[in-house]
Amino acid sequence: MAASRSIRGLDKLLPSLDPESIVAGTPAATQKLFERGRGNYAAAMRSNDITGALDRANTGILERAQARSQAANSGRNLDNTIRQKVAAVLEKPKEISGLSDTELSALNTVVEGGKVRNTARGVGNQFAGGGVSDKP
């Protein structure tokens, strides 16, 4: 909340500045830099939601899916876990707000899988995968 107030304050302050009081550039140019910076930050946070690369904890979809898959099945069902995590994100409007159509399409493709991935899953399920236990 404090950050939002600060941003609103800066958004009001910059256009009201006298161009003569600015050492370099103009208030409008500074405002554009702030807007671009906010856009870059938002994009980084959306990417981090997928990868978790910016956090020390397992916060990204890929990291959480890998950790849960390894804990549950010796890592053998990572693809399914990733699909489930991405599908859960796509069900929440707040989590996908700000994503571009291209980013949403890419996430939907992860859930649906491609021909090669889906064929490999099918073959794996036929031969030893598909819930069949390795234990005698």
Image (spheres, rainbow, N blue to C red):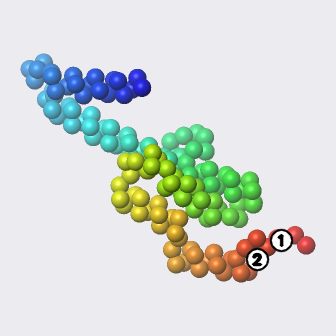
Nearest the viewer among 70 and 25 is 70
Question: Which image quarter holds the C terminus?
Answer: bottom right
Residue at the image position 31 percent from the left and 38 percent from the top: 37
> Which type of secondary structure does the marked residue at label 1 adopt?
loop
Dot 2 amino acid type = Ala
Label 2, label 1: how many angstroms apart (C-alpha)?
8 Å
Q: Is mark 2 on a helix, strand or loop?
A: loop
**Residue in the image at 54% along x and 40% along y:** 55
- Residue name at image x 29 percent, y 26 percent: 8
Q: Name the residue under label 2.
A: 128
Near-viewer residue (19 or 113): 113
Front one among 7 and 55:
7
Where is residue 105? Give x, y as percent: 41, 63
Residue 70 screen position, x and y as percent: 71, 56
Q: What residue is rendered at 33% in x and 23% in y?
A: 6
Return the disc, 2 or 1, that comes first in the chain's sequence: 2
| Residue 4 placement (x, y as % from top left) | 36, 28
Mark carried by residue 87: none
Q: Mark 1 points at which residue?
A: 134
Q: Do the residues labelled 2 and 1 touch (CB within 8 Å)?
A: yes
